[in-house]
Amino acid sequence: MDKAFWTERWKRREIGFHQPHIHEQLKRFWPTLGLPVASAVFVPLSGKSCDMIWLATQGHRVIGVELSEVAVQEFFKDGGQTPEVRSEGPFDVFSAGPFNLYRGDFFETPAEILKDIVAVYDRAALVALPPQLRARYAEKLTHIIPQKALIFLVALDYPENEISGPPFSVTRSEVERLYGDTFDIQVLEARDGLEASGNLRRRGVTRLQETAYLLRRR
Ligand SMILES: C[S@@+](CC[C@H](N)C(=O)[O-])C[C@H]1O[C@@H](n2cnc3c(N)ncnc32)[C@H](O)[C@@H]1O
């Protein structure tokens, strides 16, 4: 699964992962985290997620990293904003209001741009990556975020043989393997996600668990 896979999907509008509404577990659990108002949040593999808008309405500055320029352009267009664009290392940075979206490869993200973040919001980022990249992703994320930053992770778990990802099935034991050495892992909620996911149901998935995790560095 290379970069062209994703840029082509955006060009062909094969973006079944994009949700037009705010993720329900985000809305319910985020306010319980007690994060400072006006703090910054990191959204890796952000797509054009509406959840970034919700995070901004909670008072956060939002830093996203996304490979596809189509996704980044559409995020601002959909929100009626015209971003300023500048070049920063390997990234083009699109900025407007509370949003700074870095168009480029997550694996090149410098820790410097994340030094003020208090939390990471990962929905459909870890699960978008195949197994060998997931390990690289978790290692990179662990290294570039500040010590104090929490990770709010939403992962999907389904019978692996039913479809080939993305999204990939990521079990609780994998989350523990990837992050357990560094973070305390709390399951906020594990719920049946099949009803809400018409896309995966149509693709043949018969059981789907959607789990919201909170990771705090020890
Ligand atoms: C499944 S989508 C999820 C998008 C978003 N988190 C959401 O909830 O709608 C995964 C996104 O990751 C982006 N992506 C994949 N590999 C990437 C990489 N190495 N660096 C930055 N973005 C990447 C894709 O272009 C795609 O928009």
Image: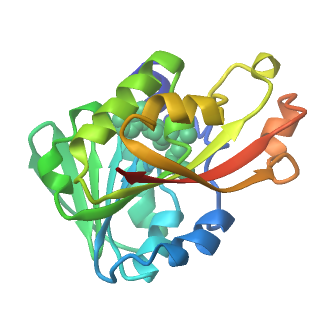
Q: Nearer the viewer, residue 209 or 23?
A: 209
Q: Position of residue 20 (x, y in %)?
A: 65, 62
Task: Give the residue drawn at x 64%, y 73%.
Answer: 28
Residue 149 lies, with reference to residue 109, above or below; the image says below
Task: Give the residue drawn at x 45%, y 65%.
Answer: 52
Q: Position of residue 154 (x, y in %)?
A: 59, 50
Q: Nearer the viewer, residue 29 or 114?
A: 29
Does residue 114 appear to the left or right of 43 in the view shown?
Answer: left
Q: Position of residue 14 (x, y in %)?
A: 62, 37
Does residue 28 appear to the left or right of 195 in the view shown?
Answer: left
Task: Give the residue drawn at x 43%, y 50%.
Answer: 46
Residue 99 lies, with reference to residue 126, above or below; the image says below
Can I make out residue 96 in this image? Answer: yes
Does residue 81 appear to the left or right of 115 in the view shown?
Answer: right
Q: Position of residue 9 (x, y in %)?
A: 54, 32
Task: Give the residue drawn at x 36%, y 24%.
Answer: 136
Residue 198 lies, with reference to residue 39, above or below; the image says above
Does residue 153 appear to the left or right of 171 in the view shown?
Answer: left
Q: How is the image coloured?
A: rainbow
Residue 46 lies, with reference to residue 126, above or below; the image says below
Question: Could you say which quadrant of the image residue 183 lies in?
Answer: top left
The residue most toward the front is 218
